[in-house]
């Protein structure tokens, strides 16, 4: 891939997810809500990656030029290292995927970073649980925004107006949801309704039913009457 694409800075691959007996359970990219359409253009790669990370460190290879770009960006420790590498590569139109599995990815019960992002009834139920304030997924907006703020500084440095517009749209989307937790039910639903009219969910969530997910979270995180 590097040989055929001179602008490639980071290449990631597919992997077979296996259990403790090395029995295949799933595709790594499929479990990370990845779709082939995310690769159709550099802009699409950048947009989809900002929505969620589907690049796993164990499957990636980088060129030394990416290190130089990382040195230009502010040091940022609050983002998983593989995600930050992928974001910087994507911001430079250097993110590429080899869609064949090259490794087995051992899935531990305690390891859920980067996988199993498809929504199930169990996950929806967890959103409404009594200890929902401890659920990492419920704090998604709070976790997402610092990364977007930091990446915006780098994109400003690169003077890429189109990517800056994309980041600003993401920031607006997630800032509107930063008060979902403990917020007014009516206010939360209105945020979802306005986003639905503008088609924002599909652009900002890498899930099969983005409006449904947005609606469920707005309900689950609102202040209980």
Image: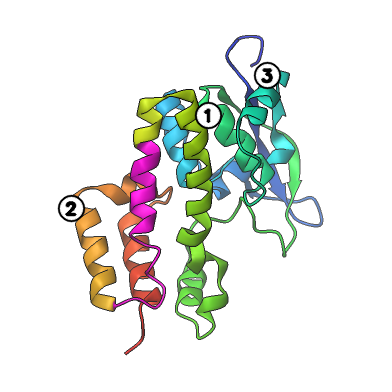
- The answer to whether residue 52 is seen in the rendering is no
Q: Residue at x 61, y 40 (%)?
A: 84
Tell me which segment is drawn in magenta. Answer: 166-184
Secondary structure at badge 3 equals: helix
Say which mark, if any, is on residue 197.
2
Q: Residue at x 53, y 29 (%)?
A: 90
Q: Residue furthest bottom?
A: 225
Instruction: Report if residue 116 lies within the magenta region.
Output: no
Q: Residue at x 79, y 50 (%)?
A: 22
In the image, is residue 51 above or below residue 134? above
User: At which x and y percent is residue 175?
Assistant: 37, 57
Mark closer to the observer (2, 1): 1
Q: Which residue is mark 1?
A: 90
The first of marks 2 and 1 along the sequence is 1
Circle 1 crowding by C-alpha within 10 Å: few under 14, some 14–19, many from 20: many
The first of marks 2 and 3 along the sequence is 3
Q: Which residue is mark 3?
A: 65
Q: Residue furthest right?
A: 21
Q: How is the image coloured?
A: rainbow
Pick the quarter of the image with the C terminus: bottom left
Alpha-carbon span between mark 2 and mark 1: 29 Å
Q: Nearer the viewer, residue 121 or 90?
A: 90
Secondary structure at badge 1 equals: helix
Alpha-carbon span between mark 1 and mark 3: 13 Å
In the image, is residue 216 above or below residue 27? below
User: At which x and y percent is residue 88?
Assistant: 57, 31
User: At which x and y percent is residue 163?
Assistant: 40, 30
The first of marks 1 and 3 along the sequence is 3
């Amino acid at each position: 891939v590097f040989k055929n694409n001179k602008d490639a800075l980071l290449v990631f691959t597919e992997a077979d997810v296996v259990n403790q007996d090395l029995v295949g359970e799933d595709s790594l990219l499929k479990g990370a809500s990845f779709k082939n359409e995310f690769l159709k253009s550099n802009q699409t790669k950048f947009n989809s990656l900002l929505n969620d990370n589907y690049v796993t460190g164990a499957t990636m290879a980088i060129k030394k030029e990416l290190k130089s770009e990382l040195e230009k960006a502010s040091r940022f420790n609050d983002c998983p290292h593989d995600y930050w590498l992928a974001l910087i590569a994507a911001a430079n139109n250097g993110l590429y995927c080899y869609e064949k599995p090259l490794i087995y990815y051992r899935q531990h019960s305690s390891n859920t970073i980067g996988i199993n992002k498809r929504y199930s009834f169990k996950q929806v139920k967890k959103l409404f649980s009594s200890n929902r304030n401890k659920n990492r997924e419920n704090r998604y907006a709070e976790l997402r925004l610092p990364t977007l703020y930091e990446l915006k500084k780098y994109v400003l440095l690169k003077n890429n107006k189109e990517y800056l517009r994309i980041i600003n749209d993401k920031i607006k989307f997630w800032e509107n949801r930063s008060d979902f937790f403990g917020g007014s039910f009516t206010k939360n639903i209105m945020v979802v309704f306005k986003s639905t009219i503008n088609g924002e969910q599909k652009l900002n969530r890498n899930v099969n039913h983005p409006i449904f997910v947005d609606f469920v979270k707005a309900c689950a995180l609102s202040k209980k009457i």
